[in-house]
Amino acid sequence: MKKSTKKSFKPKKANLTARDLNPEKLVALQDQLCVGQTLRFVTTNNFAGSVAITTTNLLDAWYLAGTATNAYQLFDFVRLKRVTIRGMAVALDRVAGSVNASPPSCTVAIEFFGLVAGSLSGGKQKSDTSLGYMVPAMVTLVPDPKSSMALFQQASGNALFVVRAVDQSANPLQGCVIDVEVVYRNSADVNPAALATARAGMQPGALYFNGLDGLTDAATAVRSTFVPRI
């Protein structure tokens, strides 16, 4: 039995009207900016061994210069997705000024310890200790899916999480790399919030990156690796 050789007619896609272009029912559009971003920071000589981070700090981490001295948060809401910290051990002789044959070690840790309603975290925490130079100590941690911390948050002074990094003698560990994965979202009905700390010498209209603790580039304990920054 021979198969039919008659070709069925299929209209070209260019001749079809997509359903979302149907003039009888226009699609709903999201009229706001929503951006996923991984921010990277490094601990400086101002680092004291641990630092607590708030939603205000996360929203201040990427900001817009209004004038040379006034800056505003670029977004109005933030959702924390993941925090990762990596640290390398430092030789004892470099820390104490004396030679020691013992292999160096370091410990890094993250804790989600939000205790205030609206930013509750569930107390999730993890730490890692590295011995020697071969492999850095590393911890990565995500908020509990059903915790308040996993939701979008507005600017607040309530602490969400803390990062820790010390060497074998409990001295603050400089040079640790901290990655913070967030989702930013703005709102047409929320007035832009000013940065928590003053700035100077900015170019009006330019975007800048801030330290994770919200402080200036010279004073921060956790400096952004992105540029420009002030």
Image: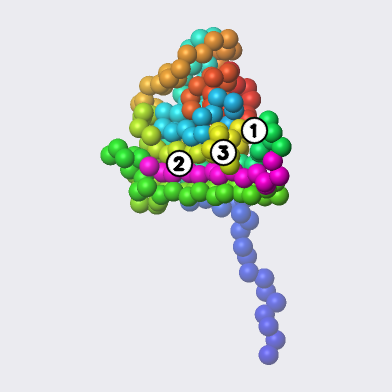
Span shown in magenta: 100-113
Q: Give the vertical position of 205 relative to 75 (above or below).
A: above
For the residue marked with disc 1, what is the amino acid? Val
Residue 86's image quarter?
top right
For the residue marked with disc 3, what is the amino acid? Ser
Q: Which residue is mark 2?
A: 80
Which residue corresponds to the image point at 50% horizontal and 44% vertical from the top-left?
A: 109
Tell me the element at label 3: loop
Is residue 157 visible from the viewing direction of this image?
yes
Q: Position of residue 78 (x, y in %)?
A: 43, 36
Residue 185's image quarter?
top left
Look at the image and say whether residue 87 sits in the magenta stretch.
no
Q: Position of residue 213 (x, y in %)?
A: 48, 28
Q: Is residue 225 left or right of residue 192?
A: right
Mark 2–mark 1 Cα distance, whole angstroms, equals: 35 Å
Q: Is residue 110 left or right of residue 218?
A: left
Mark 3–mark 1 Cα distance, whole angstroms, equals: 9 Å
For the residue marked with disc 2, what is the amino acid? Leu
Which residue corresponds to the image point at 35% horizontal and 48% vertical from the top-left?
A: 122
The answer to which of marks 2 and 1 sits earlier in the sequence is: 2
Q: Which residue is mark 3?
A: 169
The answer to which of marks 2 and 3 sits earlier in the sequence is: 2
Of the two numbered discs 2 and 3 in the rendering, the one whose residue sits closer to the viewer: 3
Observer-nearest residue: 12 or 154? 154
Q: Do callouts 3 and 1 mark residues in contact (Cβ within 8 Å)? A: yes
Q: Which residue is mark 1?
A: 95
User: Colour scheme in the image?
Assistant: rainbow
Which quarter shows the C terminus?
top right
Observer-nearest residue: 123 or 70? 123
Of the two numbered discs 2 and 1 in the rendering, the one whose residue sits closer to the viewer: 1
